[in-house]
Image (cartoon, rainbow, N blue to C red):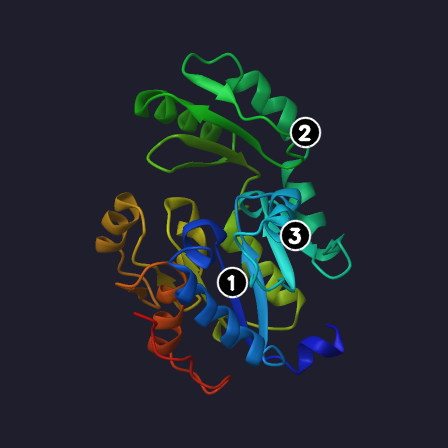
């Protein structure tokens, strides 16, 4: 663990689209400024479906002038892990993912490519295979085939996107592996998300926030959740929901966040 991390005590793991990037600009500024003011105590981890190039694109986009850079980025739905400052993979975690995936790209292609109602998503994904899905029946069939072969599968955003993942790998397990690598545990972290592809993150045993603009399918899933710790369902959207959740999970690790911007 690097000396910088020894001084930091709260690891904030957050989805990007709809979560860390959600809410209006004053709400986002309130969260980003709070993080900047306490950056010596906060480790910021993006946990997203975006790859590194799509994360980097945000910093050249005038829509996000105040966006803080993360310390680490878990991208590609939990299948890539990067130290943001060096641009290098976090080897202890990335090697585990690579081992779990093996020849998965070829095996999943044989299983699913050409299945009616599925279309490959553009891009080169090293440790996942991702599709656009036309309908729920197609998604269910593809998931059944993938799971029977031992792979993980996530259908998200109203059933539009299907990700086939290495066995036992997704946002939550990868975040826990990163915590362990940094010498931290679940009690040192708080996580946030807004869709079903955040479910493994929200239920990985870390205090969690489901922001107020979450997709209806996530709200339904929350109503059935009885695990511990409970997931805090914030009524506030995006960045404001993260601030609200940080207050809910009040901690002595860092000074409390500011009041929500109306």
N-terminal of the two: label 3 or label 2? 3
Q: Height in image: 17 above or below 112?
A: below
Q: Height in image: 63 above or below 183?
A: above
Read off the residue under disc 1. Answer: 13
Q: Is mark 2 on a helix, strand or loop?
A: loop
Q: Is mark 1 on a helix, strand or loop?
A: strand
Q: Tell me the quarter of the image containing the N terminus.
A: bottom right
Read off the residue under disc 2. Answer: 103
Q: Give the crowd class for mark 3: few <14, some 14-19, many >=20 residues within 10 Å.
A: many
Q: Give the crowd class for mark 2: few <14, some 14-19, many >=20 residues within 10 Å.
A: few
Residue 206 quadrant: bottom left
Between 200 and 30, the one lying in front of the other is: 30
Relative horizontal placement of residue 215, taking residue 1 as reference (left or right): left
Residue 8 quadrant: bottom right
Q: Distance between the residues labelled 2 and 1?
A: 29 Å
Which residue does the image show at 66% across and 43% down from the upper left?
53
Which residue does the image show at 39% across and 66% down from the upper left?
27
Q: Position of residue 238 (x, y in %)?
A: 38, 59
Read off the residue under disc 3. Answer: 81
Relative horizontal placement of residue 43, taking residue 200 as reference (left or right): right
Which residue does the image show at 56% across and 44% down from the upper left?
50
Q: Position of residue 153 (x, y in %)?
A: 46, 35
Q: Height in image: 164 above or below 215?
A: above
Q: How many labels does the image show?
A: 3
Between 44 and 117, the one lying in front of the other is: 44
Q: Where is residue 224 in the image (x, y as percent from the top left)?
A: 23, 53
Q: Could you tell me if residue 242 is visible in this image? A: yes
N-terminal of the two: label 2 or label 1? 1
- Residues under numbered marks 1 and 3 in contact, where contact means CB atoms less than 8 Å apart: no
Q: Distance between the residues labelled 3 and 2?
A: 19 Å
Which residue does the image show at 65% across and 52% down from the upper left?
81
């Amino acid at each position: 663990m690097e000396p910088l991390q020894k001084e930091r005590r709260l690891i904030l793991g957050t989805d990007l689209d709809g979560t860390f990037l959600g809410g209006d600009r004053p709400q986002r500024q309130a969260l980003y400024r709070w993080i900047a003011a306490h950056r010596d105590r906060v480790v910021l981890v993006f946990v997203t479906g975006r790859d590194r190039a799509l994360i980097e694109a945000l910093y050249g986009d005038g829509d996000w002038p105040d966006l803080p850079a993360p310390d680490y980025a878990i991208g590609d739905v939990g299948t890539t892990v990067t130290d943001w400052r060096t641009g290098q993979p976090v080897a202890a975690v990335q090697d585990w993912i690579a081992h779990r995936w093996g020849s998965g790209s070829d095996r999943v292609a044989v299983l699913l490519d050409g299945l009616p109602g599925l279309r490959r998503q553009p891009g080169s994904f090293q440790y996942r295979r991702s599709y656009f899905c036309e309908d729920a029946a197609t998604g269910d069939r593809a998931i059944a085939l993938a799971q029977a072969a031992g792979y993980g599968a996530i259908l998200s955003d109203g059933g539009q996107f299907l990700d086939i993942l290495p066995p036992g790998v997704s946002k939550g397990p990868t975040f826990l592996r990163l915590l362990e690598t940094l010498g931290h545990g679940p009690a040192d972290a708080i996580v946030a998300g807004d869709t079903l592809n955040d479910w493994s993150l929200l239920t990985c045993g870390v205090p969690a926030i489901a922001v107020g603009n979450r997709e209806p399918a996530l709200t339904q899933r929350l109503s059935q959740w009885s695990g511990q710790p409970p997931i805090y369902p914030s009524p506030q959207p995006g960045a404001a929901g993260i601030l609200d959740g940080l207050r809910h999970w009040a901690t002595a690790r860092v000074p409390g966040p500011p009041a929500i911007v109306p």
